[in-house]
Image (spheres, rainbow, N blue to C red):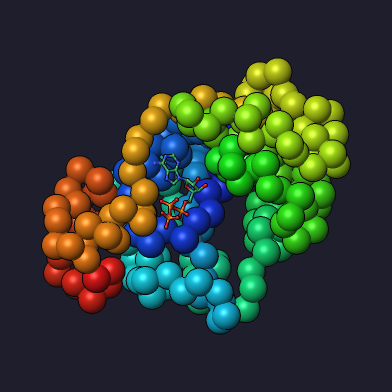
Amino acid sequence: MNITPIGILGGTFDPIHNGHLRLAVEAQEQCGLSAVHFIPSGTPPHRNTPRASAADRLHMVQLAVHNNPAFLADQRESYRTDACYTADTLAELREELGMQQPLCLLLGSDAFALLHTWHTWQRLFELAHIVVMQRPGQPLGNAMANADPALLREYTARLAPSPQLLHESPCGHIAVLNIPALEISATDIRRRCTEGKNIHALVPDAVASFIQTHPYTLC
Ligand code: ATP
């Protein structure tokens, strides 16, 4: 079997920024992904509410990816108001795309080190590969130093020597990629908006224009 894998990048995207896009480009190039689904989270009650509405966060993702045919704004979580678990989202994608399609869940090293706290986390390996994106200054080794023993066992057993292995089965491997530093965060962009500062060069132009013309979105 050799089917080109699809990447999945979930996030709050409050707002989407160039750090997210660069992460997706690196994963696409280093793993040979045919597409990346950007999946903005919904707005469950009783959690930290994002500043922008789910509809505006989805719209900004659509604006950010519209000129890249390999990037998709995936709205399956956007209008959900209940807790939305990654395993359920992956199961839904798996049903749509078939049992043979390799899926790659893209995660930062900090998120991966806490994977054992996720709802039905071991199910994730039956649904997708996990691609850990290691940024300079955030090596996975440090994050795993005090890792949960069960997570460490899965990591050791599933680590792929090369991303090429992600093409050869639908799920179950862990690949670790190095990505360059891009010191951008949505938190900093929201702060800059509140202070009336420029956000060009941090987000795609279409997203900056949307925020400028809809200032209530983030400010
Ligand atoms: P916030 O500042 O509000 O916490 P964020 O900028 O980290 O948000 P999220 O929507 O939470 O954005 O991130 C989605 C995913 O993108 C996460 O896996 C996160 O690790 C990753 N990510 C965020 N910023 C960057 C960046 N500058 N470079 C690479 N990956 C990033």
Q: Quadrant of residue 56?
A: bottom left
Whether 95 is drawn above or below 183: the answer is below
**The C terminus is located in which quarter?**
bottom left
Q: Quadrant of the N terminus?
A: top right
Describe residue 99's horizontal placement relative to residue 80 as left or right.
right
Residue shown at the point (75%, 61%) measured from the top left: 119
Residue 58 as seen in the image, left or right of residue 88: left
Residue 165 visible in the picture: yes
Residue 176 x %, y %? 62, 28
Check the image and report above or below for 144 versus 9: above
Q: Nearer the viewer, residue 17 or 88?
A: 17
The image position of residue 41, as x and y in percent, is 52, 65
Q: Quadrant of residue 112?
A: top right
What is the tally of numbered marks visible in this picture? 0
Q: Is residue 170 above or below residue 193?
A: above
Q: Relative to the observer, which residue lies in front, 22 or 152?
A: 152
Can residue 101 be seen here? The reply is no
Residue furthest front in the image = 146
Q: Position of residue 91 (x, y in %)?
A: 72, 58
Q: Residue at x 36, y 49 (%)?
A: 185
Measured as percent of width and height from the top left, residue 210 is found at 20, 64
Q: Residue at x 36, y 56 (%)?
A: 187
Q: Name the residue: 29% across, 47% down.
A: 67
